[in-house]
Image: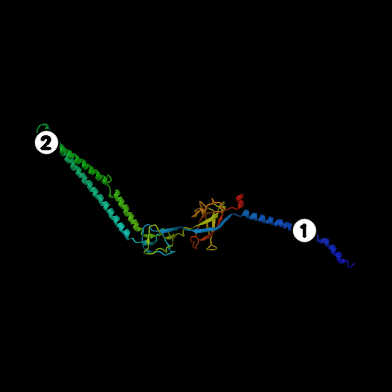
Amino acid sequence: MNAQSPSMAAAAAAPVSAPAKPAKARRKRLLMISLPLALAIAGGAVWLTGGRYVTTDNAYVHQPMVAVSADVSGRVTEVTVGENQHVAAGDELFALDPVPYQIALAQAEAALASARLNVAQLKASYASAQAQLAAAESILEVQEKELERQRALTSRGVGSQADLDDSIISARNATNNVAVAKAQLEAAASALNGNPDVEADALPSVQAAMAARDAAARNLAQTRISAASAGTIAQLESLNVGQYLSAGSQAAVLLEPENTWIVSNFKETQLETLRVGQPVEVEVDAYPGVTIHGSIESFGPATGSQFSLIPAQNATGNWVKVVQRVPVRIRLDGLPETPLRDGMSVHVSVDTGSSRLDNLL
């Protein structure tokens, strides 16, 4: 009896452990079904409630970059600023040799004085022509009276035909002299623009001389080049005293840090919910923890590739679709205390104000 007890105990225990295996399998199958389903539901919820913020790291600081050049040619005589120096609007940057332009101004002023003197001479010529016409008309009047007298004498048989012929010739000559005097007077008046009382500076010849004088004065003033606005001077190393600078050639670059904006290159697939005026947060890579606030100002009219030197040619046999990027300009509400430099990399996050679920509803 005692020898059979262990086998009997094992036989009695076997039916009890058999039902545990199906329960464990059911739990395993339930877990395999419910876990992916829960993950899918959670992922869908995250996706639907997300999408409010559109971000990109393809964004950079931009500032106006103004090429500094001279309007006139000349040899550099002085450089008054240094590389990377901050300047205010109107500060002198460099100067060119003024002597050639001083000579040109003196010549222009002399030409203007000559033009005004010529007007005075024209007025004197007009007055002389008036006097000559008056004298010619007086002589004509005398000759006409003499002709009438000779005709009367000849008709009575007192005067000779020769005297009458002389009177006729004299009257004709006097008439011609009056015509010549009138033509001379008209020419003198025409030289004065038809108005003998006109001011000298109102005549075209004098105005042309005045314009030439003003141009010469402007050229002389342009030999001293000043900053058009406040900013920082760069790329000035190549400008040296004694160097000849041609008109319009770049001598330096002026950057205006006070007028800073951000250009973010968003993927074309990110533009659906972006609108002008939406708030933006900007984080500068160079200054961790510094956040700048702004808003979307405008969207580029074309993708960035269209403005490249060699735009992509997609009409080829070997074509690969590439997601394009559109430049978006961001206006900053203010500048941080840390300086922003042109070309710095930034991270941009746009608050669209609505999630994907809100957009679906």
Q: Residue at x 16, y 41 (%)?
A: 139
Residue 44, image quadrant: bottom right
Secondary structure under the numbered disc 1 in the rendered image: helix
Residue type at the position of mark 2: Ala
Q: Residue at x 32, y 59 (%)?
A: 100
Residue 16, image quadrant: bottom right
Total count of labels: 2
| Viewer-side residue, 58 vs 347 | 58
Q: Would you name the residue on which mark 2 appears? A: 162
Q: How is the image coloured?
A: rainbow
Q: Where's residue 289, x and y in %?
A: 55, 63
| Viewer-side residue, 281 vs 341 | 341
Tag of residue 23? 1
Q: Is residue 146 visible?
A: no
User: Considering the image in quadrants, where does the N terminus appear?
Assistant: bottom right
Q: Residue at x 19, y 40 (%)?
A: 176
Q: Where's residue 286, x and y in %?
A: 52, 63
Determine crowd level at label 1: few under 14, some 14-19, many 20+ residues with C-alpha closer than 10 A.
few
